[in-house]
Image (cartoon, rainbow, N blue to C red):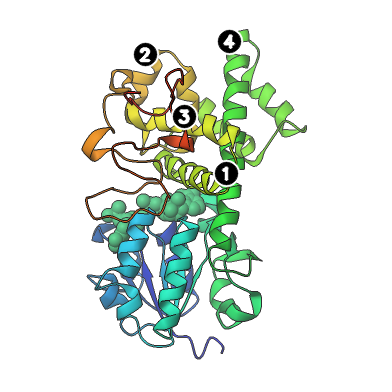
Amino acid sequence: MSHTHIRKVAFIGTGIMGARIAGHILDAGYDVTVSNRTREKAEDLLARGAHWADTPAEAAADADVVFTMVGYPSDVEDVYLSTDGLIRRSKRGAWLVDLTTSSPQLARDIHDAAEVEDKHAFDCPVTGGEQGAIDGTLTLIIGAAEKDVEPLLPLLETFSSRRFYFDQPGGGQTAKLCNQVSLASCMVGYADAVALAEQAGIDVDRMLEVLANGTGGSGASRTLAPRSVAGDFKPGFLVEHLRKDIGLAISASEDLEITLPGAETAFTLFDMLCQIGGSRMGTQAITLLYDDEATCAAAGLDWSLLDQGEEGDDHECHCGHDHGDDHECHCGHDHGDDHECCGGHGHGDDHECHCHDHEH
Ligand code: NAP
């Protein structure tokens, strides 16, 4: 199949990443219908010729390919598996491509449910950040074999420059979570370095140049550390999304009965940042955790909020789900009375938990 056979594209989720990606698809000449929870975030695309649909189901009704780029696994679950979701309401033979960073198990469930309905669903999380989305040079991490998604290549190439195939449903999400735990530890690494340099009174920018020119540097230290140092905490990539990703990776590690000490440290820090008001900041705000209270307050953080929320009824587990009564969570946790907190700790008497304000 070529571009001529795939003409109509639906795009669900026009946030930071989705709006940019949908824009490239539009520019390439496809007939694009968009849907987003908040319509204003799609206005620019509508002005450029995209059509609007009130719901994902309406957007997908007529589409050859449906992309989703929503926030959390719970959003993905809702958009695909609800009664009025994409699995039921897209047309037979349609391609359903989830670009969200989400749960590998949920990706497998969606793939299987789609197959029964004679539709092709695969996970396709991305990396490259907002800049990669703006430039149309994202890397795609695909939970399918290359030959199976070949018909979509011209479409995928409109917003990506590299594609890696992991051959099985959920494989893309697992590889993406590997990327995220590595990213998270790189961020803790550069935040430590910046704090040490600042306190020691050496030139921080010059120290970052050393990192950039040696083995201590990372993509994160090169692109994000300068923004941290400049006090630019605008997202980019939301703190709450990185917390979600690290949580999903920790859940996966629990299933495999391994521990990820770097990820657990990073989870503690990014979770703390969420608790004190930084959830909608860019991830580079991690360096604020090392600053004094006045600097934090000036950036909009409030340390008095630490450990005040997130337990009990509206407790948000690190998988990023909204655990309502009948919600089936994909993080693998048992969210009952004896809820296991991050990293699946047993919280014995002498365990010092670093996640939330649990009563151990
Ligand atoms: P975002 O700006 O929050 O975008 C998510 C969009 O999805 C929002 O516009 C949201 O609507 C919409 N949405 C959520 N649930 C929906 C539903 N049920 N129906 C319709 N629309 C829905 O986040 P983002 O930065 O673009 O990230 C999206 C995903 O990509 C996340 O999983 C993130 O982890 C991942 N990711 C992000 C980056 C990055 O650098 N930003 C890089 C790689 C991967 P509202 O407008 O109402 O909130």
Residue 105 vertical position relative to residue 33 in the rendered view, above or below:
above
Where's ligand 1: which quadrant?
bottom left
Q: Secondary structure at mark 1?
A: loop
Which amino acid, by three-letter code, is at mark 2?
A: Ala
Mark closest to the chain's N terminus, 3 or 4: 4
Which marked residue is nearer to the observer: mark 3 or mark 1? 1
* Neighbour tally class for label 1: few under 14, some 14-19, many 20 plus, Cα within 10 Å: few
Name the quadrant containing residue 220: top right
**Residue at position x 43%, y 13% from top?**
292
| Residue holding disc 2 | 294
Q: Quadrant of the C terminus?
A: top left
Q: Could you say where residue 249 lies in the image, as x and y percent from the top left?
A: 52, 46
* Neighbour tally class for label 2: few under 14, some 14-19, many 20 plus, Cα within 10 Å: few
Which amino acid, by three-letter code, is at mark 3?
A: Thr
Residue 160 in sight in this render: yes
Residue 16 in sight in this render: no
| Residue holding disc 3 | 268
Work out whether residue 261 or residue 94 is closer to the camera in this orientation and state it.
261
Mark closest to the chain's N terminus, 2 or 3: 3
Mark closest to the chain's N terminus, 3 or 1: 1
Q: Could you say where residue 242 lies in the image, as x and y percent from the top left?
A: 47, 42
| Residue holding disc 1 | 257
Mark closest to the chain's N terminus, 1 or 2: 1
